[in-house]
């Protein structure tokens, strides 16, 4: 499908599942090299990162632990403030952590999660993001592993949603502009 409709919005195919898989493989190779002598904790941000995280996890050859947190920061197609974080119960003191996320745009969500992790006295925090919007990013800290740098346009599919729909699409679609 090159065009899809979800509720009142039309989206056009933007990144294929095959292209995504190549980037997941590249990120996995980097993480495998960077953590070959460590056992990091991978923290998946739900719900969006579940597809990317599952694919990445299957390609990692290092030992690792996983945990999930739920973070909400979108309202329809608009990025809003971080609404809640639930689910982190592990003792993270002196642990190396990789946050696995579907998208980083303004960086507000990552900043809140990052600060929470450092308050838990982690050794260090890195992030792996399937997509990144550099035009929207407003934070001083770098991103460590990025699949795709994309324009500041709304996307859906491969874990990303519009009003809870579209996460199951294998490809990524971009909001069609008139």
Image (cartoon, grey):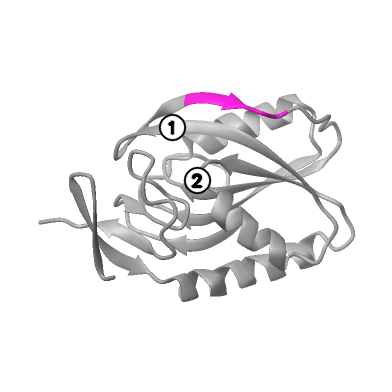
In the rendered view, does 44 fall on the left or right side of 118?
Answer: left
In the rendered view, does 106 fall on the left or right side of 142?
Answer: left
Labels 1 and 2: the sequence-earlier one: 2
Pick the front one: 51 or 84: 51
- The residue under the point 41% across, 71% down is 16
| Percent x, y of residue 10 | 20, 55
Secondary element at image label 1: strand
In the image, is residue 82 above or below residue 142?
A: above
- The residue under the point 72% across, 24% down is 119
Q: Is residue 25 magenta?
A: no
User: Please, which residue is most extreme toward the left here?
Assistant: 178
Label 1 CA crowd tier, 10 Å (few <14, some 14–19, many 20+):
some
Residue under label 1: 73
Label 2 CA crowd tier, 10 Å (few <14, some 14–19, many 20+):
many
- What secondary structure is the magenta-colored segment mainly? strand
Pick the front one: 129 or 10: 10
| Percent x, y of residue 107 | 48, 40
- What segment is highlighted magenta in the picture? 83-88
| Percent x, y of residue 35 | 81, 59
- The residue under the point 59% across, 67% down is 24
Residue under label 2: 48
- The residue under the point 29% across, 40% down is 77
In the rendered view, does 9 fall on the left or right side of 86?
Answer: left
| Percent x, y of residue 20 | 50, 69
Secondary element at image label 2: loop
Front disc: 1 or 2: 2
């Amino acid at each position: 499908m090159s065009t899809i409709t979800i509720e009142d919005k039309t989206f056009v195919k933007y990144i294929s599942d095959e292209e995504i898989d190549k980037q997941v493989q590249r990120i996995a190779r980097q993480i495998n090299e960077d953590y070959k002598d460590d056992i990091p904790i991978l923290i998946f941000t739900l719900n969006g990162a579940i597809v990317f995280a599952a694919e990445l996890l299957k390609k990692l050859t290092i030992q690792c632990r996983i945990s999930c947190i739920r973070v909400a920061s979108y309202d329809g197609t608009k990025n809003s403030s971080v609404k809640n974080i639930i689910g982190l119960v592990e003792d993270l003191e002196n642990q190396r952590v990789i946050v696995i996320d579907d998208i980083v745009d303004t960086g507000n969500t990552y900043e809140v999660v990052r600060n929470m992790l450092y308050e838990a006295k982690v050794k260090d925090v890195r992030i792996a993001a399937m997509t990144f919007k550099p035009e929207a990013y407003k934070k001083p800290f770098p991103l460590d592993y990025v699949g795709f740098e994309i324009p500041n346009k709304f996307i859906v599919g491969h874990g990303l949603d519009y009003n809870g729909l579209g996460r199951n699409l294998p490809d990524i679609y971009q909001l069609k502009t008139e």
